[in-house]
Amino acid sequence: PFWLKCAEGTPTQFAKSSLTRLLAVNLRASPHKMGTEAMFAVKGKDFVIIAADAMTAFSVMKLKDDYDKIWEVEGKLFAASGPSADASNFMEFIEKNINLHTLRTGLKLSTKASANYTRNELAQSLRKKGSYQTDLLIGGVDADGPKLYFMDYMGSSESVNKAAHGYGAMFTFGLMDRYWKPDMELEEAKDIIRKC
Amino acid sequence: LGAEHRLATAPQLDSCRASARNLAMSGYDRAITVFSPDGHLFQVEYALEAVRKGTTTVGVRGKDCVILAVEKRATPKLQDPRTIRKILTVDNDIALAFAGLNADARVLVDKTRIECQSYRLNVEDNPTVDYVARFIARTQQKYTHRGGVRPFGISTLLGGFNTDGVPELYQTDPAGTYYAWKATAIGKNSKSVVDFLEKKYVEDLEEGPALRLALKALLEVTEASGKNIEVVIVRKSGLGWMTEDELDPLLKELDDTADKISKLKETK
């Protein structure tokens, strides 16, 4: 009851002061496409670096090649892939909820807490109204060090050292396994990303 | 605030409200949905009374800032002072100070925070201070309109900036009305503070003079100590809390109690 909830609303409900979101929800589960999008991330000694491609397309037409898929929420980075409708709707919702938490408590959520909150929302929506077809990479630096989370549209979530989404992941995992080492400096990490 | 602020039946009214007491005794103050024969909503008026007993809160609008200063009641020795926050953030650039029942403020501010995020989610823009004030006023009014609930026993002062860079100061009260102010005060002894502000307020104050005006106004009715006063400066870039270290020297400078006492002694 304390979190903002997505609710399917009719236009008259929009005026209610309780939080509603006008969402047209497609309850037929659509198959999750791996996507031509690519995103990768590596964890360094006191930082996390996330890269995501900047293309957004409609069918066979490239609409934009400078589309920013990485969201910055209370100092954490959320890279969201998938149909831009799902990614932006979901991420806007997460962003506002995390902001609300900060306003209410005066404290920022840790990366672990933000990631867990996000995965809970994904897991719940999967069984209620259909999934958000969005895979995520979540990165942040807390007092106890940098954290990187690999998350998929079903709500699985793992803390990892290196991660990637999309078809590109198939090629880059090998690269990251080969070159990643613990406590990397920024230049070494940038080098890996460049290779990816 | 505990049992001494009962807003329900048969409150302790002082003798100068004898006429109100007569009417109250005849039962028109029981449920808020009932008007009295002479057009009063007693529960709302009693809520305003609760506000009048709350800690003094001052707001001053400058040229490019809003100053909110509140009197903090002295914390008991064993209490952790960090847990007492009298000025709350409602949105990234909007601060809320209140006078009245602390618990009511907490609930109302929570509703307001949700509303601000809801607005941002739906419209992808900051809510204006005016919008937030209207929302709070609308909420407070709703609770004067239904049976089985009582009004919120708080008045709020909202300070913030709109996207056009103009600072605004709004006040709401338990009746559900809201006003925009250049400078005002609510809570205990607010009348003397407002009188002071009316005399000394000048248009387009810079941040420094606005801060001094707000503090001087508060010092009319409060003890000059960093422990007793909480100050927030609302700027275009965001909210800034003044620390006790910053506040103490400024208060010492503005505190003229010693002068006033010596003047009194002279006139005697």
Image (spheres, helix red, strand yellow):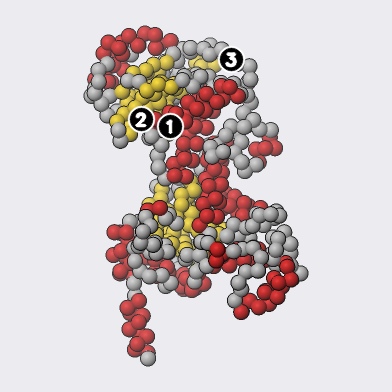
Q: Is the residue at mark 3 from the same chain as the one at mark 1? A: yes
Q: What residue type is labelled 3?
A: Ser
Q: State which quarter of the image contains the C terminus of chain A.
A: top left
C-alpha separation, residue under disc 3 versus residue under disc 2:
31 Å
The residue furthest bottom is: B268
User: Which residue bears the numbered disc 1?
Assistant: A114
Q: Mark 1 lies on which chain?
A: A
Q: What residue type is labelled 2?
A: Gly
Mark 2 touches mark 1? (CB < 8 Å): yes
User: Which residue bears the numbered disc 2?
Assistant: A140
> Up-down: is A78 above or below B193?
above
C-alpha separation, residue under disc 2 versus residue under disc 1:
10 Å
> Up-down: is B151 above or below B261?
above
- The residue that appears at 47% across and 31% down in the rendered structure is A117
Residue B134 appears in the picture as rendered: no
Residue toward you, B24 or A59: B24
C-alpha separation, residue under disc 3 versus residue under disc 1:
27 Å
Q: State which quarter of the image contains the N terminus of chain A.
A: top right
Instruction: Indicate the position of residue A134 as horizontal and vertical percent values.
Output: 50, 20
The residue furthest right is: B37
Residue A91 appears in the picture as rendered: yes
User: Which residue bears the numbered disc 3?
Assistant: A30
Examine the image and state in which quarter residue B22 appears. bottom right
Residue toward you, A114 or B89: A114
> Up-down: is B67 above or below A39?
below
- The residue that appears at 72% across and 67% down in the rendered structure is B28
Q: What residue type is labelled 1?
A: Ser
